[in-house]
Amino acid sequence: MSYLGLDLPTNLIQAFDYANHILEKQNVILQQTAEKNHYRVLEAFQKHKVSTYHLTGTTGYGLGDSGRDILDQVTAFIMGTESAIIRHQFVSGTHAIASALYGALRPGDHFISVTGLPYDTLQQVIGINTKLPGSLVDLGISFDILPLADNNEIQTELIDRYVKQNTKLFILQRSKGYEWRESISISQIEKFVQYVKSKYPHIDIFVDNCYGELVEDKEPGHIGVDLMAGSLIKNLGGTLAPTGGYIAGRADLVQKASNRFTAPGISMDIGATLDNLRLLYQGLYLSPLTVTEALKGAIFSAAFWQKLGYEVHPEPEDLRTDIIQAIKLNSREKMIAFCQGIQKGSPIDSHVVPFPSEMPGYKDEVIMAGGTFIQGATSEFSADGPIREPFIVYMQGAISHIYVKKANICAALELIRKGLL
């Protein structure tokens, strides 16, 4: 039967219709959150009197760049913090997170990751398993990993066993990363903040906020987190930021992170913005809308693949705190075919065939489907994952959830073509 301009078997049409029905039921909640976040972003722009001349960048040292400085203030307001630094010079979310950690910690300090083992690329920043030159471990900073409980809760009752005299930081990763579990919600983070601030007020709290910005109607800064960081080719870039990242939090901690990002004495006060300011401002302004499109795409994908018989996480009607949708494929062949099908549904490089390969910062080979206008921009839509059991693909982002629907169809058709569905 012809459907969406494609010849589809009955099971795909049924899955498509079912997913549309589930998405329609979720739309009211999505729209309520989008409105709250968009009003906050709009208020930030108005409060700080963003003007046309703020959209024009600088060269050289970037002295007197009011557009850069106001953008920092706008970002801090949106994230609920005293201060922020948002820069196109951050090469990735990992770079922004690393700058925050290097700023907050000193040789001899100790930190605790309270949401289990951090994401693959951050493991190398810390020095887990491999003591790379310049890693935190290499600089004499020690750490402990506190696993999440079986019910995905932070085990606050065990924290006393891990806290030491030199513990300076608790680290939380909001997103599930490449794990088959729920991500950490704002309510879970708030509960943790209230507990440790009453018991350990001298220990700061850092949140890796990647993939979580503007998914809920509060950010970690609104509930007392001291420091956070993320990428601009994820949520806050609104699919327009060409690169970059941000750090937001308490003013003294942002200052320390800025000193590591640039240099002491330079900090956040100089740095040319070139031709990037308009895209950063405009992407930030649109980000509540693009995040909502990503959530619509994730809900549709969850329902579509669940109807086809696959395990998905989160499930279609679960509450969400990030834009990631995981699908368990259970075989290397299915995972590769899935990503190749997603690529065929992309607006850019639809003719390219992705294969697993090594990627900087990852232990396993990674396959990534991402026909994006900005290289690697998971805010636009991508599907990727490390090639390891149980062969889970992680989907995220959407310029348009409508495009995500057809990309899922293309992935299913590729599985059928190879006799895998």
Image (cartoon, helix red, strand yellow):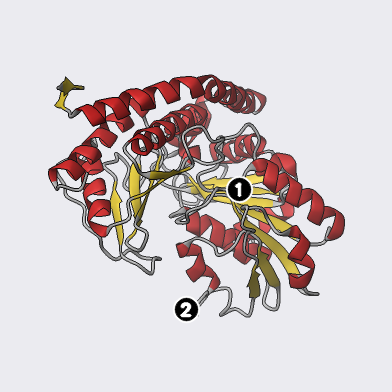
What is the x, y in percent for residue 278? 45, 32
Q: Do the residues bearing badges 2 and 1 touch, measured as CB atoms within 8 Å?
A: no
The amino acid pointed to by label 1 is Ile
Residue at x 52% of width, y 48% of height: 210
The residue lying toward the viewer, choosing from 193 and 27, is: 27
What is the x, y in percent for residue 45? 60, 26
In the rendered image, the residue lying farthest to the right is 198
- 152 versus 101 height, above or below: above
Q: Residues within 10 Å of mark 1 (few under 14, many from 20)?
A: many
Give the residue at mark 2: 130
Q: Considering the numbered disc 1 on the image, is that residue within a helix, a strand or a loop?
A: loop
- 343 versus 356 height, above or below: above
Of the residues tagged 2 and 1, which is closer to the observer? 1
Question: Which tag, 2 or 1, sits closer to the chain's start?
Answer: 2
- 256 versus 405 height, above or below: below
Please state, as top left, top right, bottom left or bottom right, where the N terminus lies in the image. Answer: top left
Residue at x 71% of width, y 63% of height: 169
